[in-house]
Image (cartoon, rainbow, N blue to C red):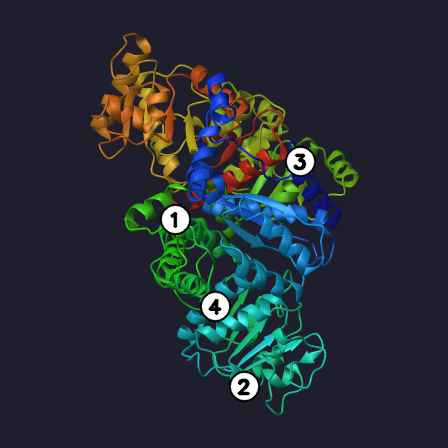
Amino acid sequence: MDKSNRKQDALNYHSKGRPGKIQVVPTKPTNSQRDLTMAYSPGVAEPCLRIAENVDDVYKYTAKGNLVGVISNGTAVLGLGNIGPEASKPVMEGKGLLFKIYADIDVFDLELNVKTVDEFVAIVKALEPTFGGINLEDISAPTCFEIERRLKAEMKIPVMHDDQHGTAIISGAALLNACEIQGKKLDKIKMVINGAGAAAVSCSKIYLSLGVKKENLVMFDINGLITPTRTDLDEMRLQFATERKGIDTLIDAMKGADVFIGLSAGNVVTPDMLKGMAKNPIVFAMANPEPEIAYDLAITSRKDIIIATGRSDFPNQVNNVLGFPYIFRGALDVRASAINEEMKLAAVHAIAGIAKKPVPEAVNLAYNAKNLKFGRDYIIPKPMDQRLITEVSSAVAKAAIESGVARKVITDWDAYTEELRSRIGDDDRLLRNITNTAKSNPKRVVFADADNYKILRAAQIVKDECIATPILLGDVEKIKQIIKEHDLELGEVEIIDPHLGAENCEKYAQYYFKKRQRRGITLFEARKLMTDSNYYGSCMVQFGEADALISGLSKNYATTVKPALQIIGTEEGVSRVAGMYLMLTAKGPVFFGDTTVNVNPTVDELVDITVLIERSVKRFNIQPRVAILSYSNFGSNEGPVPEGTRETVRILHEKYPEMIVDGDMQANFALNADLLADNFPFSTLKGKAANTLIFPNLESGNIAYKLLQEIGSAEAVGPILLGLKKPVHVLQLDSSVREIVNMVTIAVVDAQAKATNK
């Protein structure tokens, strides 16, 4: 991808709509004057007085117990260096976002315009009443060591410099498992560490805690081997000085080494260096974005190697997000006064332990893997593994209690596990899982409206992100002009103009004519129709020259669907197609159907639609809980709609007893588990909220999803067209680039599933 485009995408992402990535959202009702008198004056006086009497009540009446300060002075930002506190703010907001989506921890990011240890410590220490924990970030060494040391000593809330300890904890877990797989003993391995920054120092300390012997470890910085005779080093680094003879360079140190730890710069390790290592070597090349040695080059050089990197596109990604959200989650939940070594080591062992257990099918599906299992390509869990929040947070909380730093003791660990599970929303996670699945096996997607900038921009993104291989239909010169005007890199992408007698027009026309000749279509008309991108694109999919079609950005729904129905047809056993939206809401994903195709379905048609949608929801690795909606609750009203929906449910219960479905019911009862259980405990939804809503007609479904999209701020992914033999998906008129990318991703996953089911 052209760097200027990637840069502009990043700028657009951060500036579009409300600038930045995080916001403060009220957690209590604020709709009435009474609500406001409770939230502020005079009602707020009561919790203030209680806290004044007992300071610990601040955890009961305020957000302190779930609030972390992400704090930096911008002196060591990512790979950008000392760029200042303001320039570090996007990174700190990003860290806050990760805290929230992975562990439901709220964050205030604070960027301090200070350089000295004393100033930094004084400010952060004064903020102790506000926060439940402090995450230090992007502070240059050696200042960061002293800042963390003093804050941990002087504050009574957990403090952690994630740049140091996050990488140490994750790579420590990886080291434990890699040594087990490679048949190596921690106290025997010879280790080389390239890099001597904050992360390298912390990694070295945790490796020693795990059993590595100091005399078997050598460390290099930018000036070479760290030895006791060096005069340019502080005490923090000198503790790793070596007196071993015969080592002057990294090449020397790698000879016979069991483990290489890279926290330095890209491409500093050569294949010859790897070949000189001991049998069954372990290499953690964690420099970003370019590892110390490229993954492909490493595995080509040594068949017996285990390699981990910081990159998500290779196995064994050492990613701090496996640790910090869950470490703070556990620490906050027991009101720990510190994050101590016992808690860090508990996290190490918990993360390592997860990798040895059978991988949940949801994780396999998220990464399109058939059977992830403990071994050379799977030494640490994947970031999408939902067991991380339960197992790592619980381990950290237990360690805090056992080591005496917890001020709240958990006794019911099963209840705590359920509480942790409830914190994980499925909306963003679902979309990330779908994207990972698409990337694992990209498909050819043909775009019918390619003479449009938004389509071309989306095509660029899915190409660069390895989600799909785009094929563009339309006026070639116009498309090339748009590409040139916007500096898009689509030069190698196939562009076809059906109007110019494209290569396959006659073949497609003959096929269409034979299929529709008894429906009033002549060969002349068939040839003419093949100049339409929707007909041509549908034929490409039918003939296997593309895997999916995306259309509809500038044409109405019926115009787009008609060619697909006529050319491709419906799946075996499916009598009709249906339209479904995936609504990403604050309470998780909810599937709406039918919202786009069937105007006023009969009972039999509603049954067919429900079966089709229920089966499709399962493809997202979600257990459908289906509610057939009406303005009635289980017979409370009569009329054509409630009577029809009740009959639909009766047939579904009879013909599909394994399906979790009920109705007729009103939408609020379907979505409110407590309301449903209190009033209708007999419901087959068993007191749990529905996640799949079947509307009695297109009008109600269409109105509902658009209201939720506009007023409820839900993101709509769709319409997802269901029931065709091959994937064709229709965009909303004037969809955004993000919405187009989401639909392409859905189309690729749909194509993967249909290919598997052949």
Q: CA distance from mark 3 to mark 4?
A: 37 Å
**Residue type highlighted by circle 2:** Gly
Q: Which residue is mark 3?
A: 19
Q: Are marks 1 and 3 in contact (CB under 8 Å)?
A: no
Element under disc 3: loop
Residue at the limit of the structure toward the bottom, as seen here:
245
In this picture, residue 636 sits left or right of residue 551: left
- Residue 49 in the image: above or below residue 77: above
**Residue type highlighted by circle 1:** Ala
Q: Are marks 1 and 4 in contact (CB under 8 Å)?
A: no
In this picture, residue 379 sits left or right of residue 23: left
Q: Which residue is mark 1?
A: 362
Q: Earlier in the sequence, mark 1 or mark 2?
A: 2
Q: Which residue is mark 2?
A: 256
Residue at the limit of the structure toward the front, as seen here:
53
Q: Which mark is residue 281?
A: none
Closer to us: mark 3 or mark 2? 3
Q: Which residue is mark 4?
A: 172
Q: CA distance from mark 1 to mark 4?
A: 26 Å
Mark 1: few, some, or many residues within 10 Å (few <14, many ≥20)?
some
The total number of labels drawn is 4
Measured as percent of width and height from the top left, residue 595 is found at 45, 22
- Residue 204 in the image: above or below residue 702: below
In this picture, residue 519 sits left or right of residue 690: right
Element under disc 4: helix
Q: CA distance from mark 1 to mark 3?
A: 34 Å
- Residue 443 in the image: above or below residue 711: below
Q: CA distance from mark 4 to mark 2?
A: 21 Å
**Residue type highlighted by circle 3:** Pro
Q: Nearer the viewer, residue 594 or 704?
A: 704
**Residue type highlighted by circle 4:** Gly
Q: Nearer the viewer, residue 120 or 724?
A: 120
